[in-house]
Image (cartoon, rainbow, N blue to C red):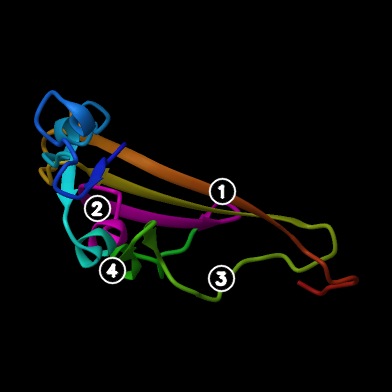
């Protein structure tokens, strides 16, 4: 998604021209290229979460096991998307060279209507964490 921001009164955000041709958010979120005329407006625009839509579901797995302690309520909106804070993760194998896999998946719906499936998407990430404790007792 590309959200275009024009700075100053001469920035062209008219539909079909200038920054509107770069911005592709309208078809997905209803937002369009934006014109800002002050530093405060620019800062506010840049601090806005770039992920549009309503969160439908959030799951976290550790070594293939779902960790139900993490829910949608743990997500916090920020300028780079969503974050879920700092938590102690259970189920990691601390043994030297043990490979642990932590995965997070979030389902998002652009229009916030669960019944319209063609505008839903899933963002996922996976992290591999290697154990470092020699002779660890698990």
Query: Which of pointers 1 and 2 lies earlier in the amino acid sequence?
Result: 2
Label pair 1/2, CB-CB below 8 angstroms: no
Q: Taking 82 as reference, is 27 left or right?
A: left
Distance (Cα) linking label 1 and label 2: 19 Å
Distance CA(mark 4)–CA(mark 2): 10 Å
Task: Place residue 3 in its image quadrant.
Answer: top left
Of the two numbered discs 3 and 4 on the same chain, state the one appearing first in sequence: 4
Quadrant (top left, top right, bottom left, bottom right) of the C terminus: bottom right
Label 4 Cα neighbours within 10 Å, binned few <14 / some 14-19 / many ≥20: few
Compared to 53, does 20 lie above or below?
Answer: above
Check disc 3 and report its element: helix, strand or loop: loop
Q: In the rendered image, which residue does mark 1 sit on?
A: 126
Q: Which residues are magenta?
A: 44-65
Q: Mark 3 touching mark 4, by CB under 8 A?
A: no
Of mark 3 and mark 1, the one earlier in the sequence is 3
Please name the residue that numbered disc 3 is placed on: 89
Report whether 71 appears left or right of 90: left
What's the residue at 56%, 51% (across, down)?
64
Please, what secondary structure does the residue beneath circle 1 have?
Answer: strand
Nearest to viewer (mark 2 / mark 3): 2
Q: Earlier in the sequence, mark 4 or mark 1?
A: 4
Q: Secondary structure at mark 2?
A: strand
Residue carrying label 4: 73
Please name whichever residue, 54 or 29, is drawn nearer the observer in this view of the structure: 29
At numbered mark 4, what does the secondary structure look like: helix, strand or loop?
helix
């Amino acid at each position: 998604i590309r959200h275009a921001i024009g700075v100053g009164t001469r920035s062209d955000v008219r539909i079909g021209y200038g920054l509107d041709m770069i911005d592709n958010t309208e078809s997905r979120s209803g937002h369009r290229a934006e014109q800002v005329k002050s530093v405060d407006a620019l800062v506010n625009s840049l601090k806005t979460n770039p992920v549009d839509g309503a969160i439908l579901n959030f799951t976290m797995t550790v070594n293939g096991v779902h960790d139900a302690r993490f829910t949608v309520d743990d997500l916090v909106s920020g300028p780079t998307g969503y974050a879920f804070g700092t938590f102690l993760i259970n189920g990691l194998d601390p043994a030297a060279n043990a490979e642990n896999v932590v995965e997070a998946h979030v389902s998002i719906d652009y229009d916030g209507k669960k019944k319209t499936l063609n505008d839903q998407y899933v963002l996922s990430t996976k992290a591999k964490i290697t154990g470092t404790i020699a002779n660890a007792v698990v």
